[in-house]
Every structure is written in structure tokens, then in C-alpha cells.
Image (cartoon, rainbow, N blue to C red):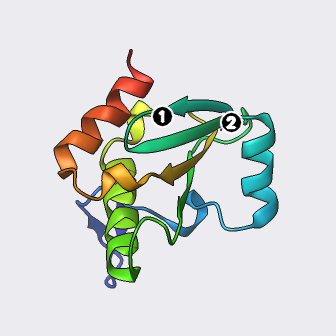
Amino acid sequence: MRRDRRGEMDSKPTSASFARYERLTRHSEFARVYAHGEKHISSSVILYSFIVCQRPYRRLGVVVSKKVGNAVTRNRCKRVIREIFRTHKAWFPQGADLVVIVRRAMVNKPYQTVEEELCRIFHP
């Protein structure tokens, strides 16, 4: 719940958003996840996860190489991954730092297929 301009409580839950504090932004944060995190591989993505127990929230970083496609394609891949993270935060453990590396195979896959692959990674 949050307050609107008049100070009244808004009925929209804030947990469905993708806030700035839920993003990995610095090179050092990505490097720590690569060095100490667990690696999970699927046909569409490579996912690194590193649990930091002090935080009550999860953070996400998305990496898409130029080998995947042009800017439009890369940005679409990033939007899909962020949307899956935003709508299914409960899949990921509290305090987790996640780095998703998009593979070329994701470009031709529909949203539901990528969503199912990420679900299988965390719920085998």
C-alpha cells in the first residue's frame, strides 16, 4: 500500500513493481555474483544466483550480448526477463542477487516458454 497525492492509502500493491533498488547496476555487483554464485543453464538463458541473507528483497541484472541481435531484439529480451522477474518474485529466494545472461536461442521463443524454463530452474 502507498499514499496518493492527497495522503490517502492507494489500493495498489507496491510489490508488483520493479524498483531501482531491485536492480544490479555496478560492475562490482555483477563480478561478485559471477565469482561466488551458482550457475544454472537452460537453452534460453544462463542464470547466476548468489544469496546475501541480510536483504529482504531480490536484485536482478540482465546481460545481453550483441551476438544475440540488434538493439531492438536485445531490448525485447531484457524486457521479457524483467517482466518474468517482476511478476514471479516469489520464485527467487529472499536476499538473492541474480544475473541472467540471455542466449541466442531466446530470440525465437515465446514469453511462456522462457517463463517455464526459469520456473524449472528454481522448481526442479
Q: Which residue is painted at 31% across and 69% down in the image?
A: 76
| Whether residue 102 can be seen here | yes
**Residue most toward the bottom?**
5
Q: Quadrant of residue 36?
A: top right
- Residues packed near mark 2 inside 10 Å, few (<14), some (14 to 19) or many (20 plus): many
| Whether residue 93 can be seen here | no
Would residue 40 appear left or right of 3 to someone viewing this image? right
Closer to the chain start, of discs 2 and 1, is 2
Q: Quadrant of residue 28?
A: bottom right
Q: Which residue is painted at 62% across and 32% down in the image?
A: 39
Q: Which mark is residue 50?
A: 2
Front residue of 85 and 103:
103
User: Which part of the image, by quadrant, shows the N terminus?
Assistant: bottom left
Q: Which mark is residue 92?
A: 1
Q: Considering the numbered disc 1 on the image, is that residue within a helix, a strand or a loop? A: loop
Q: Which residue is painted at 48% across and 34% down in the image?
A: 92
Amino acid residing under circle 2: Phe
Would residue 56 appear left or right of 85 to someone viewing this image? right
Q: CA distance from mark 2 to mark 1?
A: 11 Å
- Residues packed near mark 1 inside 10 Å, few (<14), some (14 to 19) or many (20 plus): some
> Height in image: 115 above or below 28?
above
Q: Position of residue 100 (x, y in %)?
A: 52, 49
Amino acid residing under circle 1: Phe
Front residue of 23 and 55:
23
Q: Position of residue 55 (x, y in %)?
A: 68, 42
Q: Position of residue 70 (x, y in %)?
A: 38, 79
